[in-house]
Image (cartoon, helix red, strand yellow):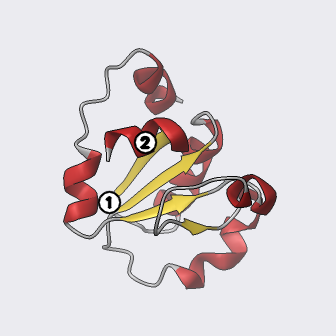
Amino acid sequence: MLDAIKNLFGMDKTDYAALVKEGALILDVRSKSEYAGGHIKNSINIPVNELQNNLSKLKNKDKTIITCCASGMRSASAKNVLENNGYKNVHNGGGWSSLNNKL
């Protein structure tokens, strides 16, 4: 929730472009139909309600992961799911179109 508030007020100083350049994975947690309507190039789609059952698709728990969705709320939930399952370097990128503009 705090990440979403920071994003709303432009307080997030994370350099997402640098993270991606260093190999970060972009995880889009919107529905499959939302993802099909537009997404960040090379992102992967696992809807937030399916994430817990698909963690095996994210094998490396040390890899940097940037979550995104439509507004930042589902991506914040996804960040919590990942961190609660031992993923060590997770960032909430907020809304996918806003994140795309930062890359």
What distance separates the C-alpha of mark 1 from that of mark 2? 17 Å
Q: Residue at x 66, y 67 (%)?
A: 46
Q: State the image coordinates of residue 25 (x, y, percent, origin top left).
A: 39, 67
For the residues carrying marks 1 and 2, which lies nearer the camera in this image?
2
**Three-letter code, disc 1:** Asn
Residue type at mark 2? Answer: Leu
- The reply to whether discs 1 and 2 touch (Cβ–Cβ < 8 Å) is no
Query: Dot 2, crowdedness within 10 Å: few (<14), some or many (≥20)?
Result: many
Q: Quadrant of residue 57?
A: bottom right
For the N terminus, give its image quadrant. Answer: top right
* Residue 8, image x, y percentages: 47, 19
Q: Quadrant of residue 53?
A: bottom right
Residue at the disc numbered 1:
89
Is 1 above or below relative to 90? above
Identify the residue shown where x is 65% and y is 44%: 74
Please rate how many residues cluster around mark 1, counting C-alpha atoms within 10 Å: few if below 14, some from 14 to 19, many from 20.
some
For residue 1, the mark is none
Task: Read off the residue under disc 2.
Answer: 99
Q: Position of residue 81 (x, y in %)?
A: 58, 58
Q: Position of residue 66 (x, y in %)?
A: 41, 55
> In screen coordinates, is 24 left or right of 44?
left
User: Which one is in front, 63 or 23?
Assistant: 23
